[in-house]
Every structure is written in structure tokens, then in C-alpha cells.
Amino acid sequence: MDPFLITSRQNQRVKQAVLLRQHKWRQRTSQFLVDGAREIARALAAGVESHRAFVCRERCQSTDAADAIALLTGNSTELLEVTPEVFEKLAYGDRNDGIVLVAAIPQRTLEDLRLAPGAFVVVVEGVEKPGNLGAILRTADAAGVDAVVIADGRTDLFNPNTIRASLGTVFGEHVFSAEGATVCAWLKREGLQILAACPTAKQTVFEIDMRGPVAVVLGNEAEGLSPIWSSSEMTSVRLPMCGIADSLNVSATAAIIFYEAYRQRNPDTNS
């Protein structure tokens, strides 16, 4: 542990770290913050480049926290000890693990993505709420989705709420972001069947064969998908809606579709 103890909330390194809560500063510096021992461990396991960690010893009481500090020490990350008062300025929400990490935003492009035969890809276009985006990433991880591509994102992947809601699955090497037109062209080149979620579609997702190479595209709840996903080469699908509501929360829709795909693609797990 660095012997230097930061006691002032006005410390320059603390102030610079706090600025990373803002989207514009994440863009400007290509850095972001990771709160929580479990999320930090998952970031490091995914190869995220760590720069500096702020540690509050009084709050590092869990096994997860001890493991995260050991990982950070092992990769020569700069560790700065802070007082509880300083940590309160650094930490996001009610996170109480006692560690906040400054890390480099991973730079990935679709050219880095190599799909296995029969891959299942998810595209998320224009989702605004970071909690929804994080929940989709978490469900995609659980359901064995091969790749998630954020198209024309209205919230960045490394928003603190996205990281928290995803339980750190946002750091997976299968998560990418790109412009919508670029994603659409890439899917076509890869030869994937493209299914566009649309509440007015004629077919339900349960009528579609998702056992082969397929991409499911989910859009903004209020506006739906942009016109690039409406060509004759794509198939619109919907979920059955039996009540007065005409749609579900996008993360709920995602969960149903992902697990229907899982059911079809893993017949031996069906009872």
C-alpha cells in the first residue's frame, strides 16, 4: 500500500477521479471509474488496464475487497489510501467495498470480433437508461450470448449505473460499440439472420428458428428501432402482449428473447 494517506477532499488526484463520473470527462480522458471489489476483479480479469486505485482501509472488510487489493498489488497499479471522508466523495451511491479504480476505457472495434459458427449476437440500439443497458448485458452473459454490440448508444458503456447494473459483465471481451450503419453492414457480411424486435410485427419470437447464426436487434423503448433495421432482408418479431400494455421494458424483452434462443439452441436442457 502506498504510504501516502490522502486526507483532503480537495486533493488534485481525487478531484480528477471524481470528474470521471461525467460522460464528457470519460470521453476526454479515455478513462472511467470502477466501484466495487467484484466489479474491479471482473475488469482486471477481462484485461482492462488499471491506472490508480483509491483504497479506504476502514471499509475494506470483505474477502472480495482483500482479493481485489491483492490483484491490484500484483499488477503494479498505483494504490492510494484515503480517509472515509475522502472515500465518500469518490464512491458512487452506497458502494461500501472501500475501493474505487481509475482504468482505461477498452478500445475495441468490430474488426476485433471473431464469431464462432452459429453465433448468437445481440444488438442494442439507442437505449438511454444505463440501468436497462446494464441489465441487458447481465442477462446476455447469463444466457450465453456470444457478442453484444451497442449501436448508437445514448448512454456510454462505462456509465457508473451501467457497470453496477451489469455486475461487471460490461467488461467482457464480447461487448462492443459502433455506429448503427456499421453494425448493420457487419452483420450482413457475417451472414447472420437479423431479427428486429418490433411490437407490431406479425410473427412472435416463439415462431422463429434461432438455432443458426442469428442477431437480435433491440431498440429504444419510446422510439423503437431506426429505419436501417426495416429492410426486406430482416425479420420483425414481437412478444405476445395479452393485457392493455403494448410493450415491455427493453431489459424484460431482452431476457425473454435471450432465453428463448437459449432453449432452442440447447435442446438437451429442456424438460
Image: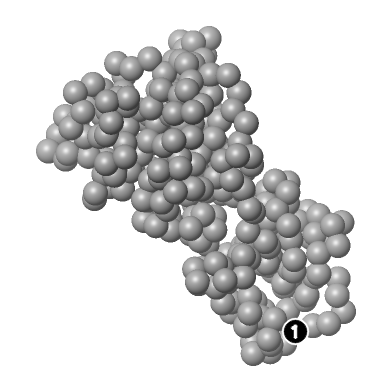
Q: Secondary structure at mark 1?
A: strand
Question: 10 Å neighbourhood of mark 1: few (<14), some, or many (≥20)?
Answer: many
Name the residue at 73% across, 79% down: 82
Q: Residue at x 46, y 15 (%)?
A: 211
Query: Which image quarter holds the N terminus?
Result: bottom right
Whole-percent x and y of residue 153?
42, 53
**Which residue is outermost to the left?**
244
Residue 145, above or below 100: above
Front residue of 57/193: it is 193
Task: Name the residue at 62% across, 70% down.
Answer: 29
Front residue of 8 and 236 = 236
- Residue at mark 1: 6
Q: Nearer the viewer, residue 216 or 189?
A: 189
Q: Amino acid at mark 1?
A: Ile
Question: Along the horizontal axis of the image, is 6 left or right of 240?
Answer: right
User: Looking at the picture, how far across and down is residue 229, in whole percent?
Assistant: 31, 36
Quadrant location of residue 256? Answer: top left
The reply to whether residue 191 is in sight is: yes
- Residue 204 location in percent, x, y? 26, 22
Residue 216 lies left or right of residue 97; in this view the side is left
Residue 70 picture quarter: bottom right
The front one of 152 and 199 is 152
Q: Which of the 4 image quadrants contains residue 246?
A: top left
Look at 51% across and 26% down and name the residue there.
Answer: 190
Q: In the figure, 210 relative to 137: above or below?
A: above
Q: Is residue 67 left or right of residue 240?
A: right
Q: Colour scheme of this structure image?
A: one colour
